[in-house]
Amino acid sequence: MRHVLAAEQFSRADLLQIMDQAAEMEKIIAAGGSRMAAGKLLATFFYEPSTRTRLSFETAMQRLGGSVISTSNATFSSVTKGETVEDTVRILAGYADVIAMRSKEKGYAARGAKVSSVPILNAGDGPGEHPTQSLLDLYTIKKEFGLERPLRVVFVGDLKYGRTVHSLSQILRNFSNVSIDWVGPAELAIQPEYTAEGDRFFTELTDEVLESVDVLYDTRVQEERFADHDEYLRLRDVYIIDPEKVSKMKPDAIIMHPLPRVNEITASVDALPQARYFQQAINGVPVRMALIARALELI
Ligand code: CP
């Protein structure tokens, strides 16, 4: 079954195929949509808040001609009565043809997949992974630079809890032309399993890093993952990307961010040519169209 659970499941060939399929989906959007998934139902079940992921999944299914059932807030679901993820997924799999799910806990999508009779799309599992986000991130990078030329990608911010960082870094290991730098405070350092020989590690966002980066991938410090709120307050504003920092970047470098942002990129950066985070979010629709169509074995 075509579950999407973790970045490591994708080979380079898979990734290139998904990029091509997403490009085809962009053409379908431009042409007014498709009836490819007519009669099919997507369930979006989110135990944790979301704007982009849930709504882009739902947009994607509707652009494919399918329909959506949704629980956007687990407070309104039987999870609050103590229902397990396994029981919830068994029931949803009886209603829908594919399920996109987000959880506060790592590993819930994989647990759901073990009992599901329909494909599960991991829409973010706590501090674990966010593989569909990393595919739209790769699509954004591909549209900007292609996937052949040497690229320096710098991950900045909450490397410990940032699930998009965990997934995208693994995806990028399929491309030997990409080198990775990590910029984060020691308390939010990247876990060793996501690092590789040749990576560079910084606790400061230095001029040298800014001058050499092609893709600056910034992240929000994940307030909801901290047990100690004072520690969150101490760490949240360590790196603020502002026009002065951006002025040190190459003119053709880009700034990505999975969003939502809080303080880590000032609004004054939004109009600068390097800002790419809003387009990045929009790229979620064709990529998720491709993922739904693959899950339903329509392509
Ligand atoms: N990038 C992302 O996961 O955003 P949402 O939390 O709004 O879905």
Image (cartoon, helix red, strand yellow):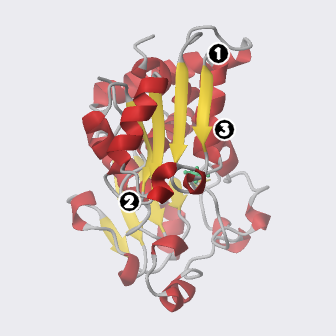
Q: CA distance from mark 3 to mark 1?
A: 14 Å
Q: Nearer the viewer, mark 3 or mark 2?
A: 2
Circle 2 packing at 10 Å, graded few (<14), some (14-19), many (20+), is some
Residue 296 locus on image (x, y percent): 43, 17
Label 3 sits on what residue type?
A: Ile
Q: Can residue 299 be seen in this snapshot?
A: no
| Disc 2: which residue | 105
Q: Which residue shows up at 48% across the image and 37% down it?
A: 100
Q: Position of residue 163 (x, y in %)?
A: 42, 57
**Vertical comparison of 275 with 172: above or below:** below
Q: In the rendered view, does 174 fall on the left or right side of 51?
A: left
Q: Residue 271 at x, y = what percent?
A: 79, 55
Q: Amino acid at mark 1?
A: Lys
Residue shown at the point (26%, 31%) measured from the top left: 11
Badge 3 residue CB within 8 Å of ligand 1:
no
Which mark is drawn over residue 282?
Answer: 3
* Residue type of the residue flagged with mark 2: Glu
Disc 1 crowd rating (10 Å Cα; few below 14, some 14-19, many 20+) is few
In this figure, which residue is indicated by the disc labeled 1? 27
Write the residue at 38% across / 25% down: 16
SS class, disc 3: helix
